[in-house]
Amino acid sequence: MSVSSNSNHVRNPSKQTKNDWRLILRLLPYARRNQGIFLLSIILLIPISIAGAIQPLIIGQAISVLRQEESWSFLATMPLANALNILIILLLCTIIVRFIFVAIQGFLVQKVGQEITAGMREDLFIHVTSLATRFFDRTPVGRLVTRVTNDVEALGDVFSTGAIGIFNDIIYITIIILTIFTLQWQLASMLVLMLIPVTALIIYFQQQYRKANYQAREELSKLNSILQENVAGINIVQLFRREQFNSEMFRSINENYREEVGKTIFHDSAVSATLEWISLVAIAGVLWLGGVFILKDNLNFGTLSAFILYAQRFFEPLRQFAEKFTMFQAGFTAIERIEELMTEPIEIQDRKNTVDIKTVIQNKKAIGEIRFENVSFGYKEDEYVIKNLNFIVNPGEKVALVGPTGAGKSSIIRLLCRLYEPNKGKILVDGIDIRDLSQVELRRHIGVILQESFLFAGDVKRNITLGEKYSLNRIQEAAHITNVDDFIQQLPQGYDTELRERGTNLSGGEKQLLAFARVAIRDPHVLVLDEATSSLDVATEALIQTALDRLLIKRTAIIIAHRLSTIRNVNKILVLKRGELIESGTHDELLDLGGLYASLYNLQMLGQ
């Protein structure tokens, strides 16, 4: 059981190869889809910020009016009660404006965030499901789940709360700075100068947060991987009493995750504590310098009160800015990880000008020829599992692939279905290089039944059609051909019976029967059986053998079978050893030859 990270997918965050803003550009297409709502959200920030900046001025004027100090000209000529009533009404108006606009703006930014999250999650899912099998061989499932869920959700937070919030904080601070400079430039200069050390500290702590957050998400990926692996393999875990051992592995990774999260909490808390301390120092500085100006009659109490409120509000956006900056750092980490996945090349792609196989084969009398020409393939570049393979399967022939474990039989099937690309040589179907066919056409032309059939959560019909549109009569016809109609009719709701995840409410044989119906409904010209009857009992195998006899009429078939007694009647047997074709012929010819096939057959007969 392995949850280790692949080196190709982990980057040291201290060596950032891409500028953060270049990563942000990756998200612009998603923002453009909702640019109207996005722009409206930003426009609403202006009245919200202005209303918030006016409130300390109003309170300061109220204090000046009460102390009969210099105030706004229109207030100076009014009676005290009237002046206070006007200031109260103005303050109430600013509160109402902020309340209404903040509610509207909050709804809009959340909507934008959810739209962006949904769009990116959908694109990421499409990209992941388009990647070659080779990618999934080396990537833990838990890592993919984390990136499609947690990381994408972090990006939604960046847009719904972070991006708009940053604009809000910048606009608010700008308006406050302009306002306080119109009141008293010395006090204003002192507050603005305090931004320099605060900014430096925020940048430092956020960089440390970024590193810790990247590692935390890597540990979360490992945590999800081991969880998925244990749930999927729960039978083996319990049968071999691996609970305690696996729990220790989980505990170790969980502890690493806790430590990394602890580091992010420390750096986040350090920012908040620093800003709290700086804001108190700023208020003390305003009181000291303001007191000096009051003693010299250069400042009144109303203006000083307004400055104290501004000092509090001045650092409040900074605190929120720091929190959002922390969110941005988490978002940047998520973007890095998502971009690593989005930039993973799609190895198996259709060519621009693909061949329509229907037009090629419509004039042919016989369909289903398969030709391997000098094909070599390895899962690693320097380790070939198939070496210079050459063979031809004529239309309508039934050919069996035989050989010991590791001979390359399943690899041949994967190459034929274009789940992998050969390193050398080419594979032709009815004279067409399979790379010149679209993947949809190729896999419709070739039907594959694997040793273990995967069923999706959903009803029986959906597991036969797999989302394609077929009439119920067509579904029932495919089920009848493959002898599964009686079994389906015995289910509680027949074809509408809901199957649990991975078809756990069916037996192994029943799942395999549905796999045969799944292929039969598509009417392929070539049928590939990869140990397709190995999990069936004798009675079910008899049913499926009858179905196979029907399916194989006028169809080419490639059969992988370990039970050599089941392939006596095929037209040709190809014997493989370590990726090379070493024998070829009928069952009787190979027995007379006395080679590897004869040895394997005699061993099986001896065992029986």
Image (cartoon, rainbow, N blue to C red):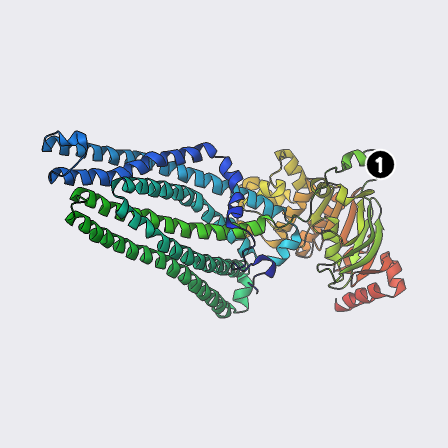
Residue 355 seen in render: yes
Q: Is residue 65 above or below residue 512?
A: above
Mark 1 nearby-residue class (10 Å; few <14, some 14–19, many ≥20)? few
Q: Residue 466 at x, y = what percent?
A: 61, 41
- Report the side of 169 relative to 567 (left or right): left
Q: Residue 40 at x, y = what percent?
A: 41, 33
Q: Which quadrant of the view contains residue 110?
A: top left
- Report the side of 263 relative to 557 (left or right): left
Q: Nearer the viewer, residue 85 or 479?
A: 85
Residue 503 seen in render: no
Viewport quadrant of the C terminus: bottom right
At 60% from the left edge and 39% from the top edge, which residue is drawn? Answer: 467
- Report the side of 452 relative to 58 (left or right): right
Q: Residue 568 at x, y = what percent?
A: 81, 56
- Report the side of 304 relative to 222 (left or right): left
Q: Nearer the viewer, residue 524 or 270?
A: 270
Residue type, label 1: Lys
Q: Residue 107 at x, y = what percent?
A: 37, 37
Q: Which quadrant of the view contains residue 596?
A: bottom right
* Kind of element beneath mark 1: loop
At 18% from the left edge and 31% from the top edge, which residue is drawn? Answer: 73
**Which residue does the numbered mark 1 point to in the structure image?**
364
Q: Nearer the viewer, residue 190 or 538?
A: 190
Name the residue furthest front: 296
